[in-house]
Amino acid sequence: MADNKVYHKINDLNIELYTTKKNLVAEAKLEQVLDDHEIPYESYGTFIESEKMYQKVYETRLM
């Protein structure tokens, strides 16, 4: 920011995938969409015991 104006807006974005079982097919489909649109991402996954669900998070930044 300069002169009280935003010259380059940055949006951090998290895409979250929740499944009852580890779903590699769903993960691959989502990753393919991101790859097809050349959207870089980092991902991590965890099992949420209290919800009995898997969570896969894809972190990206849109400029």
Image (spheres, rainbow, N blue to C red):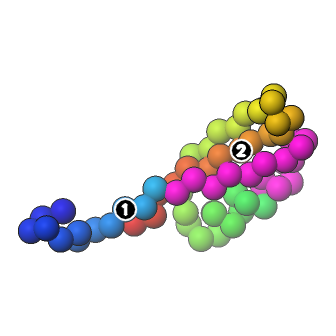
What type is the residue that disc 2 sits on? Lys
Give me the residue at 57% from left, 46% from top: 42
Q: Which residue is mark 2?
A: 56
Give the amino acid type for the residue marked by disc 1 in the picture. Answer: Ile
- The percent position of residue 31, horizontal first and vertical second, equals 70, 57
Helix, strand or loop at mark 1 = loop
Question: Where the N terminus falls, by quadrant?
Answer: bottom left
Distance between mark 1 and mark 2 Cα atoms: 23 Å
Is residue 41 in sight in this rendering?
Answer: no
Q: Nearer the viewer, residue 29 or 21?
A: 21
Residue 14 included in the magenta stretch of the image: yes
- Going from the N terminus, do you reach mark 1 or mark 2 first? 1
Find the residue positioned furthest to the front.
50
**Residue extending furthest toward the left:** 3
How would you rate the neighbour count of disc 1 (Cα within 10 Å): few for under 14, some for 14-19, many for 20 or more? few
Does residue 14 appear in this view? yes
Residue 24, which numbered label?
none
Secondary element under disc 2, as helix, strand or loop, is strand
Measured as percent of width and height from the top left, residue 6 is found at 23, 69
Q: Is residue 37 left or right of residue 33?
A: left
Q: The C terminus is located in which quarter?
A: bottom left
Residue ID at (82%, 36%):
51
Residue 27 in the figure: left or right of residue 61: right
Q: Would you call the spot at circle 2 few (<14 residues within 10 Å), some (14-19), or many (20 or more)?
A: some
Q: Name the residue furthest right.
A: 21
Q: Left or right: where does residue 58 sit relative to residue 10?
A: right
Q: Indicate left or right for 13 with 15 as reference.
A: left
Image point (55%, 50%), residue name? 59
Given residues 54 and 27, the one toward you in this image is 54
- Residue 10 shows which numbered tag? 1
Tell me how many marks there are: 2
Q: Quadrant of residue 7?
A: bottom left
